[in-house]
Amino acid sequence: MAALSRILVALVALLHFGFLVLEMFLWTGTIGQRVFAMTPEYADQTAVLAANQGLYNGFLAVGLLWGAIRVSRDFMIFFLLCVIAAGVYGGLTAKLSILYIQAIPGLIALLAVLAARRTSPA
C-alpha cells in the first residue's frame, strides 16, 4: 500500500507540473485559449496572473515529489491538503471542473497515504 500511495502522490505531482506548463508557457497560445475558453485578448491580459498561478502549481508538484521520494508522510499529507484546499476553492469560485481535476485526485492520494500508514507493520 505504501508504494501505491507514493505512485498516486507522484501522479498528482505530474498533474501539477502539467498545470505549470499550461499556465506559464501555453496560456496565450491556442492550447491555453482552448482549455480555458479565452479570447486572445483575455489571455494576453491575464498571462502574468496565470504564470504566477503556474509557479505555485510547480511548488506543489515539487513538494509532493519530495515527499514521495523521501517517503515523508508528513510532506505528502501537507502538500496533498494544499492541493485539495486549492481544488475546492477553485471549484467553488472559478470552475466546478477544478474540483474533479485537482481536488478529487488529491483526496484519493491522501486517503492512500493515510491507509498506507495503517497497513504498514510497526
Image: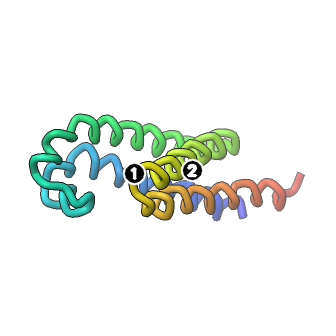
Which residue is the extreme one toward the right?
122
* Three-letter amino acid code of the residue under disc 2: Ile
Q: Is residue 31 above or below residue 58?
A: below
Would you say residue 69 is visible in this rendering? no
For the point 54% across and 61% down, the residue is: 105
Sequence-first disc among 1 and 2: 2
Q: Position of residue 55 (x, y in %)?
A: 35, 37
Marks 1/2: CA–CA distance: 15 Å
Q: Quadrant of residue 51?
A: top left
Q: Position of residue 12 (x, y in %)?
A: 50, 56
Q: Is 51 left or right of 95, judged from the image as shown?
A: left
Nearer-the-camera pick, 78 or 104: 104
Per the image, the residue denoted by label 2 is 84
* Three-letter amino acid code of the residue under disc 1: Ala
Which residue is the extreme one toward the front?
93
For the point 26% across and 62% down, the residue is: 35
Per the image, the residue denoted by label 1 is 94
For the point 48% across and 42% down, the residue is: 60
Assess disc 2: are there few (<14), some (14-19) or many (≥20) residues with their C-alpha within 10 Å of its C-alpha.
many
